[in-house]
């Protein structure tokens, strides 16, 4: 790029873009460096740059030159390139292989082809001003239209090399490819190409370059080439430009190599020079340009009411799934792995309980975690358990519960789709474990929803069209692949969560995207909770809608869920009835409960089932000795002793109605139940114990904080303050001062004045109300330049308005290294 240097700074072309201009004459008013181009920007344009590249604000640059230098650093440029769309990136790639500086017409021909050599324009010519303006706004290109310059770091990243092929498929220039070639060999190539000999290698390379860039002479040279030579060129023209050759190459390869149309890269490879490839391509830098974003259109049309109804059904199912998942961890909380996360067996168990795939179970687990409903309990043997926030969440209306889940999903950076994959070290990524954060996930989710929102209401796109659009918007390799996967997961998650319905964005989804509470829009779409069930003769109960909480909680203990959907089917079994009796419900209570909440008569088989289980429940009593079994029916105890399945319990008869066991009471209860009996636990006083396990809760903890994708986007207040500080610092650094006194330092050093001169100058400025330039060293020894307007000078201090800091400050006179009056037109 540019060859000028800044004293004590990085290269002049280090960074900042000029104000975007439609064209320029390249006269004396044209910027000579990126810093100059930046100074020509107004505050709005400078603020736009800082908003687009917030990494430039950490910390706020002291002046324009610092901003220019920082914007040219490798990390910052890489980040800026990653956020370009495909055509804007192709424009930057074309500039990287163009002459430096590059006139606008040359850049245009690299993207549209030489006139008459390409087919119909695909829109590249019309889209180029937009792409070039974006590069200028991003501080990646500066200069007027007749001297466009790509910042050096971007050119280094995008220009082709043997180690880093360019997406253009072009190779090095003739000058680069012949850099290590002997002068004799260069002269031989010049002679074979029909050019007159030169006096030095530089002029020989220049002559060869001139031949390859002259369309008429180049066409004449190629007309002499053998037909097989054209085939060789055809295989290399669009890249990669390197090819292997044998020690004895074929005649066509020798013909091309002798005339410099192929140049040696290594002992066994040759390369097609950039100038030759561009001639063969008709001047195109890319085989295919993509100036227009792939459209996302409605692939199917649905009635908006149908979309909302479908999304509401999915939302209701999501609430049921999350509640069932978290409640299942109340009494059987899974352990936290030593490295963090959930064990594979616990994920499988959760998937089986939810009757879904492991990938889907991981999504629900991560969603509950993101909403703050699950967390580690912090104990020595740490387990995952519901938090107190889960109890509060359960008391909310259904629409508000869904809103909490959706608002936790959209900004979350944890990505459940990665569960089961391996990280860079070969370790399997587990649900709730570390390394699941992907900072691009929220942006991709929001962008997917924005594309859906741009369609007519009820319109659902082809998912592949959405993926193509996202790949065009962020085409950088690696970044694009991750965004594609994130987008696929986002489409699936939005559907199962109820943000979309039948692939179209729902009304609540649009509210969520607009940062509004979606609950008011969702509430009318959800069915009202019902307070009754329909009992069937086949020992099932049908809930025609979501049940009110007391009814639903009791029925979940008394019966097992058999199927879900618009109506939930519960099945009564001996085990479920025994579970209700263990929880402290009497048979009479269960009969009354069913009679009260059933719209149909209680079927006789169900009544018999409850009475039969209740009659046998508690007939056997298990207590603690080691443990024991007692029963008034000694014949039943004899049956238990005679049953081979009881051998592992270590039973022996102590009395006609008492058996002692070596097993713990809990184990004994489970063993007897497995044998078909219905024992009940009893206390030390002989009373039946209610076997209702206490719900385990983790301490109150906040939901995980999303990992940001780089520095946060600054708000308007911060941008205004940053621009003001940069302008003030630039004023202090570039203000024109009057000629210093002879006592000042040597040329190029900061002016220094004596204490008496310093005092006299600031006192005069305070009397006249003028501004002066000062060099100042603070208490930490940091030196700075400032422009101040002194107001008061007393007690060894000067107080005045500091234009650099934009506030009134006080400075110690003995810390002022030098002072100079400003030129009359500076303040």
Image: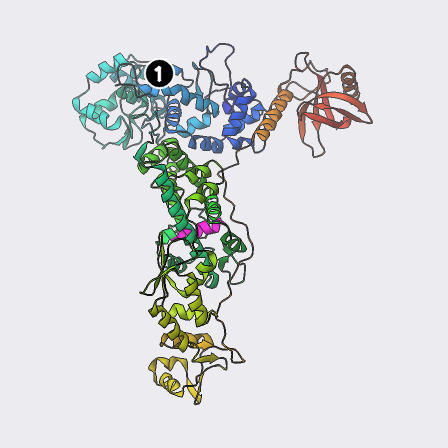
Q: Quadrant of the C terminus?
A: top right
| Quadrant position of residue 248 | top left
Residue range (magenta): 361-371
Towards the viewer: 294 or 139:
294
Q: Is residue 706 above or below residue 243?
A: below
Is 701 colored magenta in this rendering? Answer: no
> Badge 1, how many Cα within 10 Å: few under 14, some, many 20+?
some
Q: On the rendered structure, is 319 left or right of 740? A: left
* Residue that extends furthest to the left in the rendered view of this protein: 227
Q: On the rendered structure, is 691 left or right of 243? A: right
Mark 1: secondary structure: helix
**How is the rendered protein coloured?**
rainbow
Towards the viewer: 47 or 454:
454
Q: Which residue in the structure is indicated by mark 1?
A: 206
Whether residue 183 is visible, yes or no, is no
Percent x, y for residue 618? 44, 78
Residue at position x 66%, y 12% in the image: 825
Percent x, y for residue 622? 46, 79
| Quadrant position of residue 410 | top left
* Residue that extends furthest to the right in the rendered view of this protein: 795
Percent x, y for residue 458? 35, 36
Q: On the rendered structure, is 76 left or right of 676? A: right
Whether residue 111 is visible, yes or no, is yes
Towards the viewer: 424 or 199:
424
Percent x, y for residue 89? 39, 27
Q: Main secondary structure of the magenta part?
A: helix
Residue at position x 36%, y 64% in the image: 601
Q: Is residue 5 above or below residue 367?
A: above
Q: Is residue 384 above or below residue 196?
A: below
Residue at position x 37%, y 87% in the image: 635
Q: Quadrant of the N terminus?
A: top left
Q: On the rendered structure, is 517 left or right of 731? A: left
């Amino acid at each position: 790029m540019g060859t000028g240097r800044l004293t004590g700074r990085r290269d002049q072309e280090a960074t900042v873009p000029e104000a975007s201009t439609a064209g320029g004459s390249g006269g004396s008013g044209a910027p000579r460096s990126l810093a100059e181009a930046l100074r020509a920007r107004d505050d709005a344009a400078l603020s736009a740059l800082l908003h687009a590249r917030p990494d430039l604000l950490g910390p706020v640059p002291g002046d324009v030159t610092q901003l220019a230098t920082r914007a040219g650093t490798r990390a910052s440029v890489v980040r800026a390139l990653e956020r370009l769309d495909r055509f804007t990136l192709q424009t930057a790639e074309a500039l990287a292989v163009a002459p430096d500086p590059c006139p606008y017409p040359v850049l245009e021909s690299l993207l549209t082809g030489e006139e008459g050599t390409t087919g119909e324009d695909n829109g590249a010519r019309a889209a180029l001003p937009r792409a070039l303006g974006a590069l200028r706004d991003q501080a990646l290109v500066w200069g007027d239209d007749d001297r466009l310059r790509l910042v050096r770091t971007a050119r280094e990243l995008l220009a082709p090399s043997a180690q880093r092929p360019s997406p253009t498929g072009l190779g090095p220039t003739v000058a680069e490819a012949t850099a290590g070639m002997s002068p004799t060999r260069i002269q031989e190539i010049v002679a074979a190409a029909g050019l007159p000999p030169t006096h030095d290698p530089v002029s020989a390379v220049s002559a060869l370059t001139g031949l390859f860039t002259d369309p008429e002479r180049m066409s004449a040279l190629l007309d002499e080439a053998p037909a097989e030579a054209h085939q060789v060129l055809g295989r290399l023209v669009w890249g990669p430009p390197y090819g292997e050759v044998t020690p004895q190459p074929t005649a066509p390869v020798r013909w091309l190599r002798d005339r410099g149309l192929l140049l040696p890269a290594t002992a066994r490879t040759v390369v097609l020079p950039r100038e030759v490839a561009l001639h063969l391509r008709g001047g195109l830098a890319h085989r295919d340009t993509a100036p227009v974003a792939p459209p996302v259109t409605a692939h199917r049309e649905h009635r908006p009411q149908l979309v909302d109804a479908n999304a509401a059904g999915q939302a209701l199912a999501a609430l049921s799934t999350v509640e069932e998942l978290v409640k299942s961890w109340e009494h059987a909380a899974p352990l936290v792995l030593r490295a963090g996360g959930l064990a594979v067996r616990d994920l499988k168990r959760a998937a089986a309980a939810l009757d879904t795939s492991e990938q889907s179970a991981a999504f629900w687990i991560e969603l509950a975690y993101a909403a703050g409903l699950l967390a580690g309990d912090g104990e020595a043997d740490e387990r995952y358990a519901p938090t107190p926030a889960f109890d509060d969440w359960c008391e909310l209306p259904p629409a508000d519960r869904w809103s909490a889940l959706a608002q936790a999903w959209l900004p979350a950076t944890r990505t459940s789709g990665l569960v089961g994959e391996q990280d860079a070290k070969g370790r399997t990524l587990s649900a709730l474990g570390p390394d699941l954060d992907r900072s691009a996930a929220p942006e991709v989710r929001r962008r997917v929803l924005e594309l859906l929102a741009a369609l007519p209401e009820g319109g659902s796109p082809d998912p592949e069209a959405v993926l193509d659009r996202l790949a065009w918007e962020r085409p950088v390799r690696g970044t694009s692949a991750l965004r594609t996967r994130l987008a696929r997961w986002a489409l699936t998650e939005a559907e199962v969560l109820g943000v979309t319905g039948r692939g179209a964005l729902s009304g609540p989804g649009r509210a969520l995207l607009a940062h509004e509470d979606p609950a008011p829009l969702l509430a009318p779409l959800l069915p009202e909770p019902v307070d009754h069930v329909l009992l069937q003769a086949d020992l099932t109960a049908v809930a025609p809608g979501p049940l009110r909480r007391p009814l639903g909680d009791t029925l979940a203990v008394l019966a097992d869920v058999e199927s879900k959907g618009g109506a939930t089917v519960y099945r009564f079994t001996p085990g479920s009835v025994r579970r209700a009796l263990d929880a402290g419900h009497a048979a009479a209570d269960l009969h009354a409960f069913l009679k009260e909440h059933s719209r149909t008569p209680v079927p006789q088989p169900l009544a018999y089932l409850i009475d039969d289980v209740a009659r046998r429940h508690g007939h056997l009593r298990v207590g603690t000795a080691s443990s024991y079994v007692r029963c008034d029916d000694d014949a039943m105890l004899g049956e238990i002793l005679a049953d081979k399945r009881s051998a592992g319990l270590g039973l022996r008869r102590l009395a006609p109605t008492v058996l002692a066991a070596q097993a713990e009471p809990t184990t004994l209860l489970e063993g007897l139940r497995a044998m078909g009996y219905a024992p009940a636990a009893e206390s030390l006083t002989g009373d039946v114990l209610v076997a209702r396990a206490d719900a385990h809760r983790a301490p109150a903890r906040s939901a995980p904080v999303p990992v940001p994708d780089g520095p946060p986007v600054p708000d308007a207040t911060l941008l205004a303050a940053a621009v003001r500080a940069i302008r003030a610092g630039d004023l202090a650094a570039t203000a024109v001062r009057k000629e210093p006194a002879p006592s000042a330092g040597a040329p190029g050093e900061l002016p220094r004045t004596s204490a008496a001169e310093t005092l006299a100058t600031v006192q005069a400025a305070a009397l006249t109300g003028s501004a002066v330039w000062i060099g100042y060293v603070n208490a930490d020894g940091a030196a700075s330049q400032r422009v101040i307007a002194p107001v008061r000078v007393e007690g060894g201090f000067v107080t005045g308005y500091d234009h650099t800091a934009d506030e009134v400050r006080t400075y110690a006179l003995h810390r002022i290294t030098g002072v100079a009056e400003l030129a009359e037109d500076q303040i």
